[in-house]
Amino acid sequence: MNALEIKGLKKIYSNGVEALKGIDLTIESGDFFALLGANGAGKTTIIGIVTSLVNKSAGTVKVFGIDIDQDFSAAKAMIGVVPQEFNFNIFQKVQDILLDQAGYYGVPADVALPRSEEVLKNLGLWEKRNEKSQTLSGGMKRRLMIARALMHDPKLLILDEPTAGVDVELRHGMWEYLKRINAAGTTILLTTHYLEEVEQLCRNAAIMHKGEVIRNDSVKNLLSVLEKEYYTVTVSKTAGAENVSGFDITIIDHDTLEVGLPKGQSVTDLTSALHEAGIVTVSMRPKGNRLEGLFLDLVKK
Amino acid sequence: MTTNKTLISLSTLTRKETRRFLRIWTQTLVPPVITQSLYFVVFGGFVGRQVAAINGVSYMAFLVPGLVMMAIITSAFTNTVSSFFFTKWQRNIDEILVSPTPNWVIVAGFGMGGILRGILVGLIVFLISIFFTHPQIAHLGLVLIFMVLTAITFSFGGLLNGIFAKKIDDVGIFPTFVLTPLTYLGGVFYPISALPGVWQVVSKFNPIVYMIDGFRYGFYGFSSVPVLVSLGILIAFSLALGILCVVLLNKGKGIRT
């Protein structure tokens, strides 16, 4: 059973912008799937269509086999969504936000109350249950958004940049929680700008660019076809670096280079090439993560 | 969505809307009560002494149904227009839209907030009026029916305004330039039958005339328009506005891209 099946999905906004150009995408039940792309690639439009916030122009969307054109209500009952922006009522108390959300899905109070306690405790917000949501820190607000999306126990959880602006420690804590939810059977669709997050969490990923899916594969396969790995290299001088061939070299400042190392070339090859140009390599470290390199490669094409 | 789940969703939205206007009671309940009390003092007390009884009813007592109705209209309308607009503006509306809650429940839930606030404010104004005069109630059933139907009509009217509103200024334009003049010219302070002929005809294009006139009939048993005509018009308006709101939400007007 596929959790999400999208065919020929198009969206043309009223101003003529073609945000989606016939997307095909399938996410299997139980998957932890990443949707990657620069701002404006169409990720949020897809989420908007799946969750009914955006009307599609063409194509079909099925959620666990239910066509949204046939029974959107039944499809939505299986989806939990964590949007990019905080959109809860800032004057409401934390637990009231969760109980209201459960109510909108028809969850009875005797089920919603213990459920709210469970998710608030799991996300470290139980002590804040009677606080107005506007008093929470940014990280707590992010967790509240996740807690709210889980109130009706969704089969498909959609997370649109859930860890944006969250500190490293908290982000890792959220990753562990999301892994547990996924292991318990919830399918997760994640969009993020932190590609490290994708490497850590996701089994499959699609890369979007200008309204099209340009790559859709397992994260493992995506990394195996990586054509370049990027390094930040500290050197004795940068003069002459522009003449070194066979590498994608960008001069950052007087002693720093950013180098894309093509597949088949080693770090030793790079240092040798620089040495031949009269440049001494002082130190070298990988820039970003490997998936970031792939993403940049694909988008540049 | 099953019937039981739909009812849970409706009661959740109604509870949320009620909590909202009760939480900010100094903004939602107190101002209309103060305004209407001033009308009783100024128009009923000072001006009213100079005005002869109307169909045997003192001017102060004559004012009661009109001022109660005015409070209901204003409170029901402003409740839904402001609540729905700010829910849209803060994007809280998304938490309802992504759920299986049907659009008619969204209309009914927001509508209930306006209806309950309108009726509550109306009842408070009526209780205040007892300090100034002794209003009679000839037909309690009709008084309640007109009260509830008017609250429904203007609650849905406010929602309609909220659906179309794109910026905060849009929230105030209709109440200021349309609703308030129509209410003042709707027979709150005078019977329509007392107007010169041509103005009586013009007044009959004002739907608020029928609401106030029918409501006043419930109190004192006289009216300028047959009460069944007023009732029919009120039912037609409440149904039409409610259906229009649902149709617009089904089309995604103001809420979906």
Image: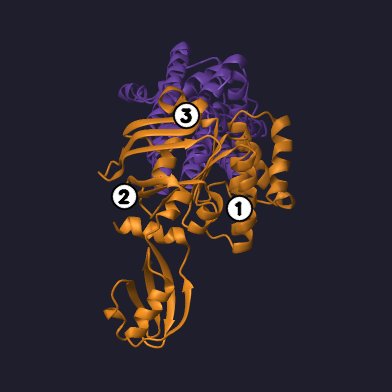
- Mark 3 = which residue? B156
x 51%, y 53%: residue: A198
x 39%, y 57%: residue: A295
Q: Is residue A55 left or right of residue A243?
A: right
Circle 3: residue type? Phe
Circle 1: residue type? Trp
| Position of residue A274 measured from the top left corner of the image (x, y, whole percent) | 36, 81
- Quarter of the figure with residue A50: top left
Relative height, residue A135 to residue B161 (above, below): below
Quadrant containing the C terminus of chain B in the rendered view: top left
Q: Nearer the viewer, residue B71 or B155?
A: B155
Q: Which one of the lettered chains is coloured purple?
A: B
Q: Secondary structure at mark 3?
A: helix
Cα distance in 3D space between marks 1 and 3: 45 Å
| Position of residue A63 measured from the top left corner of the image (x, y, whole percent) | 48, 30
Q: Are marks 1 and 3 in contact (CB under 8 Å)?
A: no
Circle 2: residue type? Lys
